[in-house]
Amino acid sequence: MSPGSQVNGDSRQVTFMERIERGEKIEATDWMPEEYRKLLIKQIHMHGISEVMGAYPEKEWVPKAPNLRRKLALIAKVQDEIGHGQLLLRVAEDLAKPYGKVRDDMIEDVYTGRVKFHNVFHMDAPTWADAGVIGFLVDGGAIITQASLLDSSYAPYGRILTRICAEESFHMQHGESIVLALAEGTEEQREMLQQAIHHWWPSMMFFFGPPEMSGASLRMMDYRIRTRTNEELRQRFIGRYAPRIHALGLTIPDAKLCHDPTTDQWTYSEPDWDWFGHMVRENTGPKSQERLQMRKQAHEGQKWVRDAMIRATVLQTQAI
Amino acid sequence: MDDARTHVAVDAQTEQALAEYLLQLADDELAVGQRYAEWLGLAPDLEEDVAFSSISQDELAHSLFYYTLLENLGVGCADELAYARPANERRNSVLLEQPSKDWAYTIARGFCFDVLEQIRLAAALRSTYLPLAQGAQKIQREERYHLLHMQTWFERLGMAGGEARQRLNEAVESLWLDLPDLFSLGTAGNILFKSGVLPLTEAELRQTWEQQVKPSFAHAGLAWRSLPTRSDKNGRLGQHGAALVELLQTFAEVYRTNPVAVW
């Protein structure tokens, strides 16, 4: 790089940061610092892949849904998650163009361990109640995170999130509807629900990330890619869900959980950061490997189909 | 409802045949919808995952529609009919209960089934049983796209040659054995035809199907093979294989833990 372009680069960086600070939105075709681009790719790639991996815990319950209406709703929900993955990976793919990276690479990255996916999707979902609680708590948590990203400085991300949030709110209602049916059901159904709440709560405390944010997360705040801290999001989640769970007459597995009305803050027990962190980094959760295998099977096992479609297109074009 | 009832032939024999036929339709859609849904998260790419998921939702929603017609006839409540009947009471074609094997089999079977659906629906539009005719009108709008989807995939997999055509050929070979009961109307055929509930005979069904499927074989570069006339099982008479028993076991796993509970 010549000294001239360095100076030029710096002045562009300054102008860019001024735009960010004025609250302007950045489009895919605008100049952007490489750091900004890389942070966006990291964030949106992980988000997109998590949506795709998020299909699997509930997919397990689609064949077993206890009535036809629940089955239809659950398929539609899983379909939405895959659709979100498709939209997000498209945004990430656009950003990754200068690096010659395409969607196939981004999908491969998950089973070769180059991109992580959300901790919740490494967990097992042992009963039908888990299918409901995933919609209730995980989608409920995802709405809080994603709504905070609506105002992201990167305009294409914000636009896609508008649609995603609208759909997630249906998912949350779908989850809530299953949860309410179980809560009003038989002893066994209530017990199943209570266990599922206990099962998912610690994962949800990890979901928003540590109170001390990492360097990359802080840089994302500087660039206004994200605008809320991990702790703000977690507090909002507890504030929304702890009262709802208690209203159902169910318990939360945290003796320390309490609300301080003067600060409006919740005290809670820290999840096992090391255990969850290791699980996400090394894919060692109860279902990590099984689900990565499914994704690999979908991608590599069906490659012959994608290849055939390309061949058919070429042959068809030649024939015209 | 009054309007509909005036179109229902009142004699018990016709009503029984109508119920038989509705069970065939509902059970077909349930079996194939369940098999399609197994592709969730596993389809050849994300776009197809989304598309195929819509198709499985449509099929299962059609099954719910037919079970609801049965419920209105007093045969039983819709979810009970879907969940509680054992394999030997099911009326679906054995073709539709088979596991999906691979993408080529899924597409080839889907194509064969969707052509059948089109023919059945076209006839149902003229049914003397008004609720069936009305439902067919709506279902036909969705099925048109299913057929277009399956046909496009079928022909393109064949056109591509190589492994894809070979797999397609193997799929056809395997599903051909299960074709016969797809065209069967079980014990209900004659009464359905005479009463005008289904203005279509088994022979017409077979013949029209053959005419419509054949050109796609040519486009796909596959040799046509004559239709088998008999198979060892007729699903319309409740004869099924282990595949349906397995399908239903999974299907009703949660339901069976407490069939009277609200889920």
Image: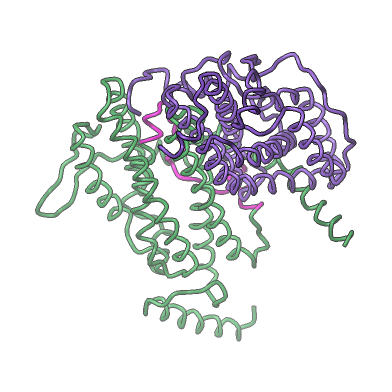
Chain colours: A green, B purple
Q: Is residue A237 left or right of residue B160?
A: left
Q: Is residue B179 left or right of residue B248?
A: right
The answer to whether residue A62 is above or below residue A45 is above
Residue A108 seen in the figure: no
Residue drawn where x is 45% and y is 81% of the image: A14
Asked where in the image residue B244 lies, by quadrant, the reply is top right
If the image is split into quadrants, where does the C terminus of chain A sit?
A: bottom right
The answer to whether residue B203 is above or below residue B165 is above
Asked where in the image residue B204 lies, by quadrant, the reply is top right
Q: Is residue A118 magenta?
A: yes
If the image is split into quadrants, where does the N terminus of chain A sit?
A: bottom right
Q: Is residue A183 left or right of residue A276?
A: left
Q: Is residue B16 magenta?
A: no
Residue, far left:
A262
Residue drawn where x is 21% and y is 35% of the image: A248
Asked where in the image residue A8 lies, by quadrant, the reply is bottom right
Point out the stretch of residues depicted in magenta. Answer: A104-132
Percent position of residue A17, x then y: 43, 77
Q: Is residue A98 left or right of residue B80?
A: right
Residue B224 seen in the figure: yes
Percent position of residue B139, x then y: 57, 43
Percent position of residue B8, x then y: 50, 31
Percent position of residue A223, x then y: 42, 69
